[in-house]
Image: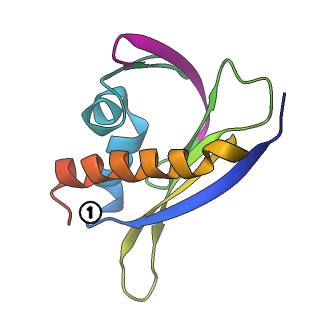
Amino acid sequence: MSEKTKFEIEFVIQSSPQLLYQYISTPSGLSEWYADNVNSRSERFTFIWDGTEENAKMLKKKSDEFVKFAWEENDDDSFFEMRIIVDEITKDVSLFITDFAEDDEVEEARMLWENQVSDLKQVLGSK
């Protein structure tokens, strides 16, 4: 198995951290923008896209700050994390994504996140 490359992207989101956290940490919130449907039992989440299921475990979370997941089929240390950052001076809210992809798939993975976060912004009424 080849090593995956870690990448990070930041999106400015016009939302309160509390509202944004609901959309990144709950099955109903994630179903609005990240996947077609999301179910969870304890810290095990099932993400459904076009009838295909992917399972992930929520590794860590901190209310109104971040969630960290790992795909169950991964046999490496990769994960994806969505962290809410609030600028102390401007109070701007950002969603900071950390993810991993194969070297030749990093650009595609970035574009996927951009599309999904665009959907999130629409749901939130953010520009």
| Mark 1, residue position | 15
Q: Is residue 70 left or right of residue 14?
A: right
Q: Is residue 2 left or right of residue 100?
A: right
Q: Badge 1: how crowded within 10 Å, few (<14), some, or many (20+)? A: some
- Residue at horizontal 62 percent and vertical 43 percent from the top: 105
| Quadrant where the N terminus is found in the figure | top right
> Foreground residue, 63 or 35?
35
Q: Is residue 42 visible?
A: no
- Provide the residue span drawn in magenta: 49-60
Q: Position of residue 25 (x, y in %)?
A: 42, 38
> Foreground residue, 72 or 40?
72
Q: Is residue 45 above or below residue 83?
A: above
Q: Is residue 88 above or below residue 4?
A: below
- Residue at horizontal 15 percent and vertical 57 percent from the top: 125
Q: Is residue 33 left or right of residue 48?
A: left
- Residue at horizontal 45 percent and vertical 51 percent from the top: 111
Q: Is residue 125 magenta?
A: no
Q: Is residue 88 visible?
A: yes
| Quadrant where the C terminus is found in the figure | bottom left
State the SS at label 1: loop
Q: Quadrant of residue 90?
A: bottom left
Q: Is residue 103 above or below residue 84?
A: above
Q: Position of residue 101 (x, y in %)?
A: 66, 42
Q: Is residue 50 magenta?
A: yes
- The residue at the far left in this view is 125
- The residue at the far front in this view is 104
Q: Position of residue 86 (x, y in %)?
A: 44, 72
> Foreground residue, 23 or 98?
98
